[in-house]
Amino acid sequence: MTETLRGKVLQASGFHSPKRGAIEAFCDALISIGDDGEIRDFSLPGSAGHDALLDAARRDDRLVSAPRGSILLPGFVDLHIHAPQYAQLGSALDVPLEVWLQKYTFPIEARYADAAFARRAYAVLVDDLLAAGTTTAMYYGTIHDEANRLLADLCIAKGQRALIGKVAMDDPDQCPDYYRDADAAAAVAGTESLIDYIRTHPDNRDRRVLPVVTPRFIPSCTDGLLEDLGALARERDCHIQTHCSESDWEHGYAFTRFGASDTESLDRFGLLRRGAVLGHCNFLSAADMERIRVREAAVAHCPLSNAYFSGAVFPLRAALEKGLHVGLGTDMSAGFAPSIFDSARSAITASRMLESGTDPDLAQDTRSRHAGVRIDFRDAFHLATAGGGAALDLPIGVFRPGFRFDAMLIDPQAPAGSIRLWPEIDDGEQILQKILFTASRANIERVWVDGLARSGTATAAVGLG
Ligand code: GUN
Ligand code: FE
């Protein structure tokens, strides 16, 4: 069984989407992967040097051929996921956001004070996400230093690319006594300590795991903490993540407290910049969108979660056409499916409903004010891969020299899987469309991060190595 593709040349067929709206299909491409997991060369049959590369790889015993019929895709990027909430996956979906936090979510997150519980829950999560094709995850942790370090240890040990934040939340008005940073200074100290832990981790020299400055959202943070975290992100040159204009309540909260939108308020605190990822952004004004674009921050679109907690659909197409960075998030467990396949499907479905409108009592021509806003599987696939990579400003999501080899191999014929292709019917992009809509875990044969096999069931019997 081939555990690594480092130093090898992979011959495979598949798809990627370097540009939104366009899918590039490749057949028997040769992908040369360096000893460090970076893609050195991507070569199509018939292109200059292809035959020489194939001959040399064969001669040096460096050629690895993917099984015939298998499909290579870039690994998926989950831009917004709450690691501790895995313990309540598939439950607690019956109340509005502000009630959900107090009634279910803060209590479950508080349990991660117990390091043994954290280790158990996080180990399952990281394994499950890798098996689902999520090669990069941007995680919210909890307020607990030890549990956050454990999550980092597990991502490093299991080889998932991860961006991890200590959740900062110090405002006694919104956060319960049993689950709150003692004060702004404690939240900043915890954040700095996780930054140092991750950046100096002896097994993280290649920086596959990165720290994230993580004010939970404006309502849970005092002004002083927001200010300090903005300064810290700038000084330590860190990614940032937070929630922005997620629900009517949250969107209204910033106006009441600051007389300005979430977006504008975050900007005032220095929290909008390249590498900042804002979850949701459902209620943005045109000025908010423009501000996010100018700051080169990104939106994590979490369509499934929005159906339960937002009461509105993010105007995805408008954001894309304005040139904002956008990728997909599961927002697990507000989103009950910890799979970017599901997020992609939900993004397509939500855009269709925004376009059509949803009130059957209205005539068709007045049911929606949003013409032409649907996205299709091409856009969704791009957002799940290259779009997520660009949002994070990381070289991932595309099979191109200089990018990391983060990928999954789909077996469309896995008997326990859920893809059914018909050779006389399916070809070209249709195959990708069917994969995107119908794949399940059993179809994900193998997952690599940085050229190292991280999950999957492939054995010598199916020809990989
Ligand atoms: N806003 C603040 N915290 C959270 C959270 O954990 N999930 C979601 N969906 N929204 C939030
Ligand atoms: Fe969230």
Image (cartoon, rainbow, N blue to C red):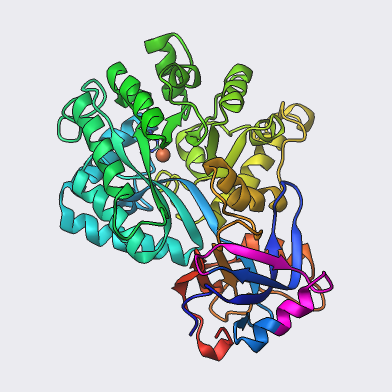
Segment colored magenta: 35-55
Horizontal placement of 387 versus 176: left or right?
right
The answer to whether any part of residue 30 appears in the image is: yes
In reply to whether residue 49 is colored magenta, the answer given is yes
Q: Position of residue 172 (x, y in %)?
A: 21, 22
Q: Position of residue 216 (x, y in %)?
A: 35, 32
Task: State the residue at coordinates (59%, 33%).
Answer: 314
Horizontal placement of 167 versus 455: left or right?
left
In reply to whether residue 50 is colored magenta, the answer given is yes
Please state which of residues 276 and 377 is positioned toward the viewer in this rendering: 276
Q: Is residue 354 above or below residue 108?
A: above
Please state which of residues 219 and 159 is positioned toward the viewer in this rendering: 159
The answer to whether any part of residue 103 appears in the image is: no
Horizontal placement of 11 versus 168: left or right?
right
Q: Is residue 296 above or below residue 173?
A: below
Q: Name the residue at the bottom extreme.
A: 461
Task: State the residue at coordinates (65%, 60%).
Answer: 399
Indicate the quadrant where residue 435 lies. Answer: bottom right
Please state which of residues 168 and 377 is positioned toward the viewer in this rendering: 168
Q: Quadrant of ligand 1?
A: top left
For the C terminus, the quadrant is bottom right
Q: Position of residue 368 (x, y in %)?
A: 71, 29
Q: Position of residue 433 (x, y in %)?
A: 70, 61
Please state which of residues 329 and 15 is positioned toward the viewer in this rendering: 15
Task: State the residue at coordinates (68%, 32%).
Answer: 323
Indicate the quadrant where residue 128 lies. Answer: bottom left
Q: Name the residue at the right extreme.
A: 46
Q: Is residue 450 above or below residue 346?
A: below
Indicate the quadrant where residue 203 lies. Answer: bottom left
